[in-house]
Image (cartoon, coloured by chain):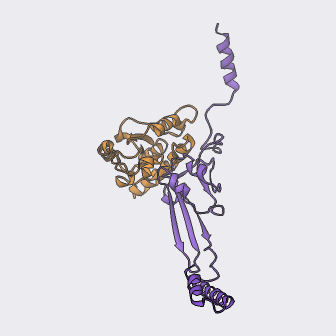
Amino acid sequence: MLQNMIDSSMKKSPWIFHINAGSCNGCDIELVSVLTPRYDAERYGFKLCGSPRQADIVVVSGPVTMQSRERLRRTLAQVPEPFCVVSLGSCPRSGNVFKGSYAIDGPLEKYVHVDVSVAGCTPKPEAIIAGLAQAAQLLEEKRKEARK
Amino acid sequence: MILPYLGQSFKNLFSKPVTEAFPAGDPPKAAEGYRGRLHYDPELCINCGMCMRVCAPQAITREIVPLENGDQQITFTYDMTSCTFCRMCSDFCTKKAITLTDDYMIVGSAHEDFLVSGTFIKAAPPKPKFTPEQLEAMKKAAAAKKAAAAAAADGEKKPEEKAEAKGEE
């Protein structure tokens, strides 16, 4: 009974934590615009939280740079299971134009399994919302499986 | 003083909300000239490889499979997770085989969701009528014939020298 209540309320509030792994700030701005009145993802319960320990969905933007690599790994280790990883833009998935650079140690797939990717350089807010919705669905399935 | 604000608040009572109803409704159309998911038409492509050359993030790969009859099966694959949507490939495509559509919903989990590819068969150039060996033989035969004719026309004067000169030419 109590578990059911917790489940339904967790379903309606997937909290987002945003990691910038050396992004150019384009994707970061678009992610913030998703929470503004025009796109308003907060009506579906997506809330940007300040700590990885409270997060359900981790949004990563940027090719993983050498400087951010260790911090990314440390932050991802703090996120409680089960969680979803959403990669924002082309960079985390492939490195984009920075591919082959000595300062890049990507792709993100090397460090964590990426559940949903939103491609684009940068993606439109609508595409980000669609990606987050897909991640929220995946998260629900993951929770059900973890309970079994 | 408060009157204009009153007017605005009265207007807001009856106006639509600014929030887009997107996940509930249809996604709105992208702005004019938006560079979204790439569209590739293999029928127009001539395999010049210019798009691969100008692509900064190396998002384009080409696979050439030789067929039995000498034709080539050419597959171009455009990786949307690697693309930076600069439209250079489209600008440089002489045959306008590449266009960037206004489809911005490039969301998925598997890598295949992000690939745009097309295959076409490039026919082998027509084979020459004669092989190089045959052509060489024909040339020699023609030269010999000419030499023989010249020798016959000159008569008994200097047949050996004439034949040599012809051969040298």
Q: Is residue B120 above or below residue B14?
A: below
Which residue corresponds to the image point at 33% horizontal and 48% vertical from the top-left?
A: A102
Quarter residue B119 falls in: bottom right
| Chain B tint in image | purple
Residue A64 shown left or right of residue B11 in the figure: left
The percent coordinates of residue B94 (x first, y second) are 63, 55
Q: Where does the image place residue A71, in percent across and percent down from the top left?
A: 30, 42
Task: Please give left or right for residue A140 compared with residue A125 in the image.
Answer: left
B59 and A13: which is toward the camera: B59
Q: Quadrant of the N terminus of chain B?
A: top right
- Quadrant location of the C terminus of chain B? bottom right
Tell me what hue chain A is rendered in: orange
Vertical placement of residue B46 versus B18, above or below: below
In front of the other: A31 or A24: A24
Q: Nearer the viewer, residue B44 or B26?
A: B44
- The answer to whether residue A90 is seen in the rendering is yes
Residue A54 spot, x, y in % from top left:
37, 40
Residue A72: give x, y in percent of width and height: 33, 44
Residue name at image x 63 percent, y 57 percent: B97
Instruction: Residue at 46% x, 37% y: name it.
Output: A28
Query: Which sits in the foreground, A63 or A125?
Result: A63
